[in-house]
């Protein structure tokens, strides 16, 4: 229990970040003081080579930390607020760099009001370094799912039912295209949209 960004606990013998085959994370949303204890411009772990996230919003900080913590063939999944898909300025530059690098395999939009402490909708960013070169060259595309409609009301919150989870996993793993739900988006379409990944631009729900 500490500060993952300023004082990561998983390191190798050289004092660099340890790297893993897989990483899954549900980091704090929109952390307002992520720069506490570090100077991002001189980060000893080199996490911000793709850009420095805004000082008052740490969403991309955690995503970059996890990407840096993956092996060259590593895969990851990170739950972040929807805003990471379309916010501008520093975040837009990081998003563009990650897409050009080919690291983002897919995006899964989730229903609003799933998580305690916030009603905002979140998404899962799926990272895959293994086939990044194919996506960077435009040979492979980015798979998007809009799963925001599949849920049950559960008291004050929404909840994914087992059938909703099965559908997401099945469609994602088999990369099945379904109208109003999922599609494979080519790189040139993302470029045309100026690297804005907001799901309604790609999936007409």
Image (cartoon, rainbow, N blue to C red):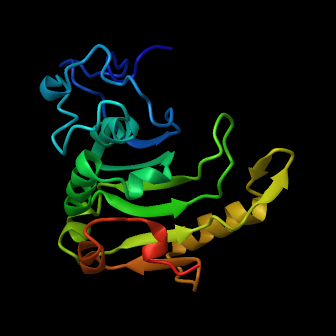
Name the residue at 51% across, 14% down.
Answer: 1
Residue 37 occupies quadrant: top left
Residue 124 higher or lower than 50, as above or below:
below
* In the image, farthest residue toward the left: 42
Residue 139 higher or lower than 62, as above or below:
below
* In the image, farthest residue toward the right: 155
Q: In the drawing, does residue 108 fall left or right of residue 135? A: right
The total number of labels drawn is 0
Q: Position of residue 56 (x, y in %)?
A: 36, 31
Name the residue at 30% across, 28% down.
Answer: 18
Q: Position of residue 80 (x, y in %)?
A: 48, 46
Residue 60 higher or lower than 145, as above or below:
above
Q: Give the quadrant of the C terminus.
A: bottom right
**Residue nearer the viewer, 72 or 141:** 141
**Residue nearer the viewer, 34 or 71:** 34
**Residue nearer the viewer, 11 or 89:** 89
Q: In the drawing, does residue 202 fall left or right of residue 98? A: right
Q: Position of residue 10 (x, y in %)?
A: 36, 22
* In the image, farthest residue toward the bottom: 179
Name the residue at 59% across, 52% down.
Answer: 121
């Amino acid at each position: 229990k500490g500060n993952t960004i300023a004082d990561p606990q998983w390191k190798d013998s050289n004092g660099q970040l340890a790297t893993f085959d897989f990483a899954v994370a549900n980091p704090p949303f929109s952390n307002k003081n992520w720069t506490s204890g570090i100077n991002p411009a001189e980060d000893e772990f080199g996490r911000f080579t793709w850009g420095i996230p805004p000082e008052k919003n740490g969403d991309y900080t955690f995503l970059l930390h996890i990407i840096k913590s993956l092996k060259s063939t590593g895969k990851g999944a990170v739950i972040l607020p929807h805003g990471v898909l379309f916010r501008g300025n520093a975040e837009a530059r990081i998003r563009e760099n990650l897409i050009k690098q080919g690291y983002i395999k897919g995006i899964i939009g989730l229903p609003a009001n799933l998580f305690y402490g916030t009603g905002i909708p979140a998404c899962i960013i799926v990272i895959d370094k293994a086939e990044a070169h194919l996506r960077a060259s435009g040979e492979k595309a980015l798979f998007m799912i809009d799963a925001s409609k599949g849920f049950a009301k559960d008291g004050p919150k929404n909840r994914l039912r087992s059938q909703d989870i099965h559908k997401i996993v099945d469609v994602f793993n088999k990369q099945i295209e379904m109208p109003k739900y999922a599609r494979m988006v080519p790189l040139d379409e993302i470029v045309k949209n100026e690297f804005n990944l907001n799901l309604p631009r790609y999936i007409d729900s």
